[in-house]
Amino acid sequence: MTVELGFVEVLACTLKKVLIRKLAEHILRLFMVTGDQSGKSRTKTIKSIGYLDELREKYADPIEHFSNVAKQMEQEKANDVYLTIKIRSDAKVGKNNANRKNYGHIVFSKVYHELQLDRFFNNKQRHENFKFDSNSIMKVLIFARLLYPCSKKATVEIKDQFFDKADFTLDDVYNCLTHFNKIEKEAQQFIHEQIVEQYDRKTDLIYYDVTNYYFEIDKQDDFRKKGCSKEHLPNPIIQMGLAVDKQGIPISYRLFEGNTHDSQTLMPALKDIKKQFQIKRIIVVADKGLNSGDNIAFNTVLGDGYIYSKSVRGASAEFKSYVLNDDGYTWIGKDYKKKSRVIPTEINVTVGKYKDGKNKKKKIQIDQKQVVFYSRKYAERSKKQREAVIAKAVDLIANPSSIKRLHPMELLTMLLTLSLIRIQGKYWIPGKSYFWTKKR
């Protein structure tokens, strides 16, 4: 499809007296003369006013009266410019056509300016020595991330698809990242204040989670270190803790060394959040990776609340018995049930370090509310996932050579599964040869 754009300008509005020969009478008509960018003019009838004899009964001088009306219309339309679009439905615009423009980012641009981010970045650039436009770079990086998630290099290659000014190079983007890192705390604070003011953000309940990013480097350094990669890769990583509000809008983030355990990121991250954003009380919602005695104690001492998920499989026998006992459950509809209790619970809290550097732990008892729920849909989903793993394990037994195609973490899952499932009336026992050889 091709689109041709043209501009039409009103040149004049005129009144004409037209003779209707069959009736031998004159009629007054208003005409508009328009011109396009090529210089061609066209005349079209705007309105037929009426027969001249009949108009004389209402107006002393109809021609003079409607001539003035035409002049008034001409003045009103003098500044009007009409845009005409011609579309050919049988043509296509090439994917790499330089004239292709994306206007979808206007929605994000509106929010960007509502938050006054343009003012923030322009102000932060005033006392810097670099010449590139940091505000322009940030806008394009945001729009590209939302519409075409890609690398910084690929973003520069598509920057001209946006209507916004994008007069910068890839080197400018890389150099500007140093500037963004320098002002990242101020930027987070400014954005938070704008969201509170304009969108009435509430921060009494936050959700916190940790992810990590790997780097294509061979050796680790003081910050990018080898740790538990979410993508199961051996590359050095960094940890990122992210806090969002109840609407899922980010509040703050903090980076940690790659070998930092997820549970060890919560306390420093929350301290920063409460201090930076002057938040009095927070209820933290996080998964079981953050569920540690130190974090629970930290939340409790500060008067904050917490909602942590808990693994049933790794819990005590008493807790498993409580979960599996049907007594006390309340059904909500046909697919969901729950029950809860408040019970004294022991947690292990770090109270110091031994001489060898290991943490010194102490057991503390607290009253904890435990909420247990069951979802039929979730149970069916988990069952299908287990069946898929079992089927793959059985296939591995039948075709041992396929082990070479497995990812190390996938292989570990298969080995754990094989240690539990029953094959042909016998249990496969780790360490004994069912199909394995020393080479395998």
Image (cartoon, helix red, strand yellow):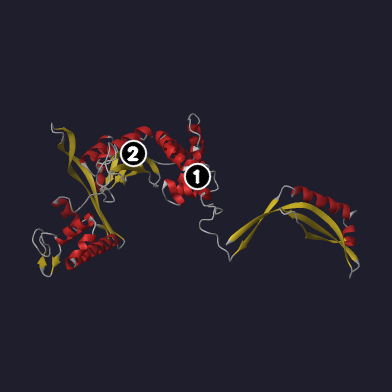
Q: Pinpoint residue 235: horizontal percent, then vertical percent.
A: 27, 46
- Residue at (86, 52) in percent of width and height: 65
| Amino acid marked by disc 1 | Val
Q: Pinpoint residue 100: horizontal percent, then vertical percent.
A: 55, 54
Q: How many marks?
A: 2
In this rendering, position of residue 172 left or right of residue 14: left
Q: Which residue is disc 2 drawn over? A: 254
- Residue at (45, 52) in percent of width and height: 148
Q: Pinpoint residue 166: horizontal percent, then vertical percent.
A: 52, 43
Q: Quadrant of the C terminus?
A: bottom left
- Residue at (17, 33) in percent of width and height: 351
Residue 384 can be seen, yes or no: yes
In the image, which is nearer the foreground, mark 2 or mark 1? 2
Nearer to us in this view, 324 or 52: 52
Nearer to us in this view, 204 or 86: 86
The residue carrying pointer 2 sits among few (fewer than 14), some (14 to 19) or many (20 or more) residues within 10 Å by Cα, namely some
Nearer to us in this view, 395 or 153: 153
The residue carrying pointer 1 sits among few (fewer than 14), some (14 to 19) or many (20 or more) residues within 10 Å by Cα, namely few
The numbered mark at residue 111 is: 1
Residue 106 can be seen, yes or no: no
Q: Is residue 395 above or below residue 223?
A: below
SS at mark 1? helix
Based on the displayed image, in which of its 4 quarters is residue 280 positioned? top left
Name the residue at the left extreme.
Answer: 432
In this rendering, position of residue 337 left or right of residue 112: left
Q: Is residue 190 above or below residue 73?
A: above
| Amino acid marked by disc 2 | Arg
Based on the displayed image, in which of its 4 quarters is residue 17 positioned? bottom right
Label 2 or label 1, whichever comes before in sequence order: 1
Q: Pinpoint residue 237: horizontal percent, then vertical percent.
A: 29, 44
